[in-house]
Amino acid sequence: MKNEIGITAKKDKDFQEWYIQTVLKCDLADYSSAKGFMILRPYGFSIWEKIKEKIDSEIKKTGHKNAYFPSLIPESLLGKEETHFTGFTPEVFWVTKTGEENLSEKLAIRPTSETIMYEAYSRWIRSWRDLPLLLNCWNSVLRAEIKSTKPFLRTSEFLWQEGHTVHATKEEAEKEVLDILEIYRMLIEEELAIPVLTGMKSDREKFVGADFTTTLEAMMPDGKALQMGTSHHLGQNFSKVFEIRYLGKDKEMHFAWQTSWGVSWRLIGALIMAHGDDKGLILPPKIAPVQIIIIPIFYGDKSKEEILNKVKTTAKELNEEGLRTEYDLREGYTPGWKFNEWEMKGVPIRIEIGPKDLEKKQVTIVRRDSKEKNQVEEQKVPKIITKTLNEIQESLYKSAQKNLENKIVTLTKYDEFKAAVKKGGFIKTYWCSRNECEDIIKEETGADIRLIPFDEEKISAKCIKCNKKAIKISYFSRAY
């Protein structure tokens, strides 16, 4: 597969094979010799860097600071919050030896950082003056995922950011949860051009150890939901275990209120699935590491030097305008081969400069999303390019929004619900809020509650499963 030129699988015929080919052939990632692990290649890492830059900038505006904590966690520390520990136990990698010596206590390789961070928080926080504590970490975590790996979506190690904050009041923590969720929504919709639904997780699906979990859910073209990020209100569950207390202005000791939140490189997986086509990637301009690729076209040595100078001059002008531009001067490859490779890599705009363009003092501009080709006068290039990039960004979002809207149905009958699950998409329905019904639905259909919307609508039907009084509107789907 890797040695074959281009993407050979069709997205609408074999979605899973198309996805794997796109990841590998676009040089985003590769498999590691360690089972369940993935190598992030430079092109894939450059996309992660753009995502990271945006999130980092936005959370720093709100007073958060970056920190780093150890990747090894003593078993006794990980087990302090029993519910949290039990939830992660099946996924934990353990270190039991150093060289040939057995450790006196097992060390867990970080599955998430709550325990290692909160043990330190208990030492750092003494009074109301130390609050709020707003920390974020950029790191990797390890969770055993051996059987059903999929690059960017399910691997044993993944890159992410995880924020962990401490507040004096429940209300401050609640505001933090929703503020972060909004930052995530803005990133995903405005930068990645992927529309999302936001809401609450059910008690069954919330983060282990949280009072409640908020989520952002996207719908992929194959009809499966993808959780794009989560923001959790931890209440005082961890602060009571780890003794995170502060002396209030009232001269009394209080347990703090906490939050945690995060997104991972699965956002790259979402980008691939949401926007790609049979040729490969289509990257939204705001997140594309390379927004414009310039390819020279010449025949023999005639006008070659002049064309190459024009290519370099055009790239310099565009980069000075803040447009991320590169050119491809590799020898031994035809212009057509280069066109196909950069199309596969999803660069939003291709500029072609050949003898006729030189003669007419123009360049040829080709859009990756629509394949539209236009000739543009030299002096108008920066303005037209900027306009076209904005149009591509908007077009990709509208296309993904249409996919989302087309994959939401509202149902009240369980037979119709079961049939709809097989077709894919979100099923908006009514639920009694009992765990029993949620469990049975998941067991019988494979669909679970992806979110309970924030906006409360009038309940106009009974529970989809038990036909008793419905309490909540919920969105069900099968998911990655």
Image: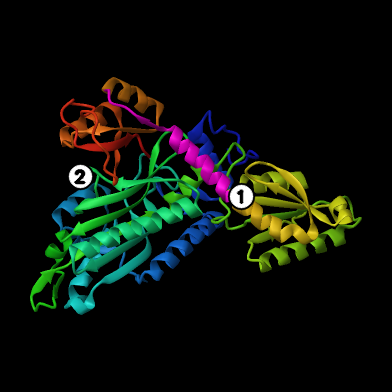
- In the image, residue 404 lies in the stretch drawn in magenta: yes
Question: Residue 412's spot in the image, x, y percent?
Answer: 28, 26
Question: Residue 216's spot in the image, x, y percent?
Answer: 36, 48
Q: In which quarter of the image is the N terminus?
A: top right
Assess disc 1: are there few (<14), some (14-19) or many (≥20) residues with their C-alpha within 10 Å of its C-alpha. some
Q: Quadrant of the C terminus?
A: top left
Residue drawn at point x = 72 percent, y = 63 percent: 315
Q: Is residue 424 visible?
A: yes
Assess disc 2: are there few (<14), some (14-19) or many (≥20) residues with their C-alpha within 10 Å of its C-alpha. some
Which numbered disc, 1 or 2, marks the residue that appears first in the sequence? Answer: 2
User: Is 117 in front, or is 64?
Assistant: 64
Residue drawn at point x = 26 percent, y = 55 percent: 232
- In the image, residue 5 lies in the stretch drawn in magenta: no
Residue drawn at point x = 19 percent, y = 69 percent: 168
Between the residue at mark 1 and the residue at mark 2, the CA separation in whole angstroms equals 41 Å
Secondary structure, mark 2, is: loop
Residue 320 to residue 391: above or below: below
The magenta stretch spans which residues? 393-413
What residue does disc 2 label?
203
What residue does disc 1 label?
391
Question: Residue 35's spot in the image, x, y percent?
Answer: 40, 46
User: Is 460 in front, or is 26?
Assistant: 460
Are the residues at dot 1 and dot 2 in contact (C-beta closer than 8 Å)?
A: no
Residue drawn at point x = 20 percent, y = 44 percent: 203
Q: Can residue 23 be seen in this view?
A: no
Secondary structure, mark 1, is: helix
Residue 131 to residue 294: above or below: below
Question: Residue 302's spot in the image, x, y percent?
Answer: 91, 55
Give, as a three-letter code, the residue at label 2.
Asp
